[in-house]
Image: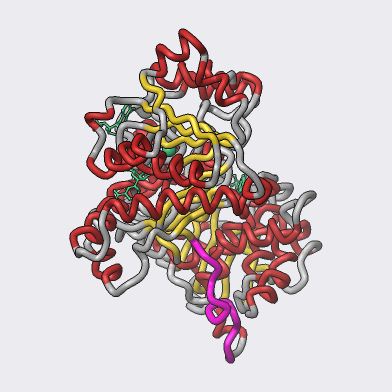
Amino acid sequence: MTELLTSAQMRTIEQAAIASGKVTGLELMERAGQGVVEAVFEEWPELAQSSHKAVVLCGPGNNGGDGFVIARLLRQRGWAVEVFLYGDPAKLPPDAKVNYERWGAGGGHVHRDWETIYKAEQALRLHMLGASITVDALFGTGLTRPLGTLHNELWHAFDLDTGPIHRLVSVDLPSGLCGDSGRLLGMEKFAVQSEAKGVAPSALAATLTVTFHCRKVGHVLAQGPIMCGKVVTKDIGLSSGPKLPSVVTILPKGCVFDVQAPFSGCIAKGTGHKYTHGHALILSGLSGKTGAARLAARAALRVGAGLVTLGTPHEAVTEVSAQITAIMLTEIDAPEILTRVLSDKRLNALCIGPGFGVERAGEFLPHVLAAKRATVLDADALAALAESETGFADLHENCVLTPHAGEFKRLFPDIAAKLAEPPTKGPAYSKVDATREAAKRAGCTVLFKGPDTVIASPNGRCSINAAVYERAAPWLATAGSGDVLAGLITGLMARGFAPHHAAETAAWLHVEAARSFGPGLIAEDLPEELPKVFRALGA
Ligand SMILES: NC(=O)C1=CN([C@@H]2O[C@H](COP(=O)(O)OP(=O)(O)OC[C@H]3O[C@@H](n4cnc5c(N)ncnc54)[C@H](OP(=O)(O)O)[C@@H]3O)[C@@H](O)[C@H]2O)[C@@H](O)CC1
Ligand SMILES: Nc1ncnc2c1ncn2[C@@H]1O[C@H](COP(=O)(O)OP(=O)(O)O)[C@@H](O)[C@H]1O
Ligand SMILES: [K+]
């Protein structure tokens, strides 16, 4: 698992490293600047062949300090560099000030008060038009409030109405993007306008973002991926040495993890007979609505549950039995029959919701939850849960709720409203905050779907399965893919995976299967692609 850090956590790590005496802030800043220059030449090797022109936009904090280092290093390579400072040099923090002075001592000029410059000469725009790269070192993890008029100026100076600027390199975070939530502070107006025009929601949407030590949560959530372009992480010497483990334990807030490939050992089937690997029961909808449960059942079987049974209403038996082979069928017409079926303790995981019907789900839910099995509640079961009188009282820690944004809103309207509020100050309320709050309230694991799927459990554990950047899987936006995910979680829980682990692993496999199949994917393809994914994992 890789950690995704919040801005506060990153600061804690930096400060602890500096306090330990093993590194100075100035050294960290130098390495950060070097990391950006390195990443630029790795991304565009042609720029390393000769000298070019760069524009570097520096802000009033240490992000600006990184900008001065970058400017100096590029100039040392013979580049012509124009530096614009937003803010008062006298007020720069100490390390940034040292680098500002080093830039000046080497003969470097700093354009100041660029609002006037823009209005008088449009210098910024002119310089940028002729530059091979523009570096955004305005704000990083210290962004506390919206960019306001500065952003308006940049829109005009960049003349971005028609598209993104060529090779905009962002230092740590695109300025304006909240590092904890991936949301753009105070830029809803631009978000709406740009969506209509099909361009990025900010003048500062980067081609390349170079961050330090670890990716931040905001790189993968919400608008983060659109704003960052591509994210490269550079080591600045915080990972080496024995000090990090103790630093990590004093992090101020719970950590968030990036879901990584499961160990082949946990996916592989050990010895044992089919019952060793569990028996999943997937509850089917009525005739004409049975496809969703069949998809889930197929996924549960493919992910390795020893046996899978579809609990099918009598009137749908012909429809279902005509379309299954290895999957078994048992008639379940009424909630009481479900309770009787579940007296077989070998049925150890349950899925209700896909194609089930909201009203029926409302009738079955109390019996499902009373059985205290590992249970996935998806689709119609979530709608029924939102309407139920007992609310979350009957949920237990072996439940997993799998809402998409609409279902999340029905289940947790106040939390969804908080998340929908336009962010005006950083750190903004994030999908991580929302899912954590939801899991705590529900008392069970919540998997909040999307390209940035967030999984949280009541104990505060939280992971993000980000299908973004090199793991983008837009083909998952297809009917029935959520049913497959529900089946994967159920199958893994039948195999004995704990709810959070099952949700993480299923979400990862879901994206991998989609990526392995590629364009043209339909939900039926997902379970069938799993063997290939398992083989690649060495399972
Ligand atoms: N620490 C280290 O050792 C290392 C740090 N590194 C680098 O430092 C970055 C973090 O630096 P940072 O903490 O100084 O914050 P930064 O993002 O530069 O901004 C703070 C300034 O901006 C201001 N401000 C905020 N929002 C504003 C707005 N909307 N409009 C106008 N002003 C606004 C804010 O003002 P204030 O809120 O205090 O009034 C403050 O003056 C990090 O991302 C990385 O690049 C690397 O060198 C590695 C080593
Ligand atoms: N653009 C996307 N990139 C990655 N994953 C996506 C994208 N769109 C949807 N998904 C995933 O596909 C699944 C869709 O589930 P859901 O909305 O319940 O669909 P359905 O009800 O049709 O099964 C979720 O797991 C979601 O995270
Ligand atoms: K930046």
Q: Position of residue 319 (x, y in %)?
A: 77, 56
* Colour pattern of the rendering: secondary structure
132 part of magenta stretch: no
Q: Residue at x 56, y 48 (%)?
A: 40
The image shows residue 67 at horizontal and vertical percentages of 41, 39
Q: Is residue 109 above or below residue 261?
A: above
112, 227: nearer the viewer: 112
Q: Is residue 534 above or below residue 184?
A: below
Residue 268 is one of the magenta-drawn residues: yes
In the rendered image, which quarter is residue 537 located in? bottom right
Q: Is residue 453 visible?
A: yes
Q: Main secondary structure of the magenta part?
A: loop
Is 408 in front, or is 266? 266
x then y, percent, for residue 139: 37, 35
Which residue sits at x=64%, y=61%? 512
Q: What range of the chain is rendered magenta?
A: 259-271
Residue placed at 65% from the left, 45% from the top? 50
The residue sitting at 53% across, 16% down in the picture is 156
Estimate the x, y position of residue 533 in percent, counting from the top left: 68, 69
Q: Nearer the viewer, residue 224 or 514?
A: 224
Number of marks present in the image shown: 0
Q: Is residue 185 left or right of residue 466?
A: left
